[in-house]
Image (cartoon, coloured by chain):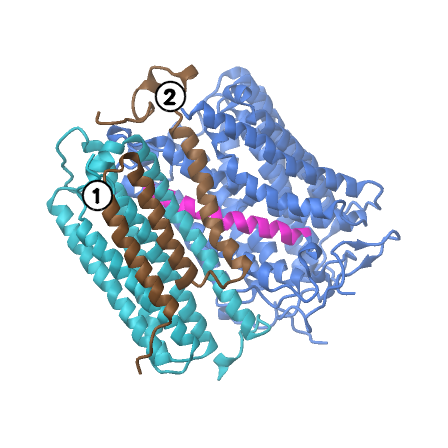
Amino acid sequence: MTDTNYLTADNRLRSWFFTTDHKRVAILYFAGITMFFGVGGAAATLIRLELATPAGDLVSSDVYNRLFTMHGIVMVWFFLIPSIPTTMGNFLLPLMIGARDLAFPRLNILSWYLYMIGGAFVLYALFFGGIDTGWTFYTPFSTFYSNSHVIVGIVGVFVAGFSSILTGLNFIVTVHRMRAPGLTWFRLPIFVWSLYSTAIILVLATPVLAITLLLIALERLFGVGIFDPRIGGDPLLFQHLFWFYSHPAVYIMILPGMGVVSEIIPCFARKSLFGYKFVAWASISIAVLGFFVWGHHMFVSGQSVFASLIFSFMSYIVAVPSAIKVFNWTATLHKGWLRFDAPMLYALAFIGLFTIGGLTGLFLACLAYDIYVTDTYFVVAHFHYIMVGGMVTAYFGGLHYWWPKITGRLYPEYWARAAAILIFVGFNLTFFPQFVLGVLGMPRRYHVYPPEFQVWNVLSSAGAAVLAVAYLMPVFYLGWSLFWGRRASSNPWNATGLEWQTSSPPPEHNFTTTPTVNRGPYGYTPDAKAVPQNA
Amino acid sequence: MPDAFPAPQFANLRQQEDVARLGMWVFLSTEVLFFGGMMLLYYAYRSGYPAGFAEAARHTDIFIGTINTAVLLTSSFAVAWAVAAAKDGDGRLAAILLGAAALLGVVFLGLKSIEYLKEYHEHLVPAVNFAFPGKQANSVELFFIFYFISTGLHSLHLTIGIVALTVMALRTARGQMTPHLRNGVTVTGLYWHFVDAVWLFLFALIYLPGRGGT
Amino acid sequence: MVRRPPYALLWSLAALLGLLAITVTLAYQPLGPLNGPVAVTIATLKALVVAAVFMELRPSRPLTLAVACAGLCWLAILFWLSSADFNWRADVHTASEMARVPPYGPPLSGSH
């Protein structure tokens, strides 16, 4: 029995910064992701502080524009999109399929460097004046009228985009070609299906973002009027190209979260996932159908009514596979032996909050309704319910679930449950009032508002304060656990996946011998025992 | 020889070769969408301004364009032959062919530069010295914006390909054909053929419109 | 030292150069609105030859074929739904003053 694991195998600094071990790359990403979450969170704190009063008293309008732009750029491209795939995905994908590493380990570490370099450009733009275009970079403001660091920011996102593409490429090839003997597609854990679906979107959508950003940079830098109406250019073409990426991007963000929930629920309900094949196909469907709906961001832009009709219709269709997943999770819970450890609390919160976010998406998909609530706080609340209530919650759930595997330590359970509950309370207090504000007519991206909106804004800002405390708690108790937490066994949750069949933390090459898989991923028996995949 | 064994994450050489090809094809799919975004612009603006685009296309040099297409097609032929030679273990032949293809790529870039210079003298470069008489000036400018960006990006990809081919030529020149090197030649070849295929479409969109006499 | 190139490659090069000659010739024929589609079709044929023979797609596995097609399929989605917008801007029932003025109005046809 060897004593070394991937963490202790080599202690020199260069063994970390030149690593090809997917587990170490995941840790490197985790550091970056956490830092950017902090930066985006700081911007959010200032935003909510400003919005507590109707007057624009904390910051000027110009600064406010730069705050919400930074919040959006950092949170979307440097937290949400990479979060689960590059941390838990990188760490767990080879383990879950019984492989020794990803298909292209050197591309993996390269993609981390690209992520950090892209982030450096964006941080530079942030600290040297900011960007004021919104994270959506609409033309002609971004190309012609804005006086902010648009190009620096674009370069940062462009470089980070390549990081995304390489990760997606790696995952696709790995899942197709490096599964252990006996591991057929329908024996894969749903987390792997989710990562695969996410990878499809990463690979097919991100290049369009790349060309779009390049075009804005060229127009801004050289004055070539690609989207310039004065020579017959069409700003809507920018929006088509931008949203062709950015809508599937939201599925990049949520699919891995759904995958995490699909792993947690069977384990803590001690039941096999209900409707496994439906959930697997639903993941692929979301990835594919998500490419047909981007125009729902452009209903009032001047787009043709014909296109709007198609996009509205497809937006309803794309909700179906998500709903299928929610039904299947719920059916898994039914008559299960439920244990309410922290990961389960997060997974349950995800189901509820994602459902609310998803349903309000259907409100927005309705053309007649969207005209009234577009560009209001209704939209802001909708996407925060999905991204924060859904995705960030799933991220924390996965973090707690796999923390013993990744670090070899157990976190303090009661503190974790307290934080999970506080997050849930703080989140709803922050974002539910924003639905009301939206319907009442408060526009987004404004920091000055009529006094009658103040009550709801104060509630929201109070909730944000609770949320800030709640998000800080894990920093402390997870950090504490690294040094003083109880050491974890290889399978502290008594779960069935292949990743639990190796030590915590895993050895450098994952498995001493390549496992042979004989059964599906959720072998939980009626007497609550767990049958691992390679038994 | 260390190269005769697969990298540690692979079970055997066959898997390694398979993975290399699949990986390059996935990457090429991303490139299809990258160039495809530009094609959308072309599609939209040509639908909106057919007369202007036809007028603009008449001002491109179809002679240079056709020669360049033939040059790239021949270079692809050389690369495909090089891949076949590499499979047979003939490193020297592969090196010669890869070098020839790289040379043809340089010829392409040379002709392209001449073409760009010509367009500069004809005042067809947007944001630099664009001046076009007549009512179609705006849509002609849009055409040339598309032209310079897409051929510029294409030339950038071609340059990367030339460097890759040269590196591969130097490595195969020693005649020792290992599985690792064979994979390298194959995936470099795939990339080169893709750059050629992109040019085939650019040629049809840039040089051919507006010549039908109407 | 110089060996004969594989026949498949030689025939492919001949076909490609032949198609090149054809497409340039056809470009000068007055085919009206067909000139564009003809040029793109021939370009597609050439690309198919390059893909099938030079890039060895014809003897390859279904997965490789699927990946090769995926990019084009997704591009088709982008083209189809974007054109549902810019080719349909002047909707009869919602035409406003702005919808009659380019670039938001009907496509310019002929010489304007």
A259 lies left or right of B205: right
Amino acid type at image mark 2: Ala
Looking at the image, is mark 2 or mark 1 nearer the viewer?
Answer: 1
Residue stretch rendered in magenta on the structure: A190-216
Q: Callout 2 environment at 10 Å: few (<14), some (14 to 19), or many (20+)?
A: many
Q: Which secondary structure is most common in the magenta stretch?
A: helix
Q: Of callouts 2 and 1, which one flags the residue occurring earlier in the amino acid sequence?
A: 1
Q: Judge whether residue A204 is colored magenta.
A: yes
Question: At which x and y percent is residue A177?
Answer: 58, 63
The chain whose colour is brown is C
Residue closer to the observer: A353 or B180: B180
Question: At which x and y percent is residue B93?
Answer: 33, 78
Identify the image quadrant of residue B187. Answer: bottom left
Q: Chain of mark 1?
A: C
Question: At which x and y percent is residue C90?
Answer: 37, 21
Amino acid type at image mark 1: Tyr
The residue tagged 1 is C28
CA distance for labels 2 and 1: 33 Å
Please tell me whether residue A497 is drawn above or below residue A298 in the rendered image: below
Residue closer to the observer: B175 or C98: B175
The residue tagged 2 is C90
Q: Secondary structure at mark 2?
A: loop
Colour assignment, chain A:
blue
Which residue is found at the position 59% from the left and 60% from the top? A176
Please tell me whether residue A504 is drawn above or below residue A33 in the rendered image: below
Which residue is found at the position 32% from the left and 68% from the top? B78
Residue closer to the observer: A352 or A196: A196
Colour assignment, chain B:
cyan
Which residue is found at the position 38% from the left and 59% from the top? C50
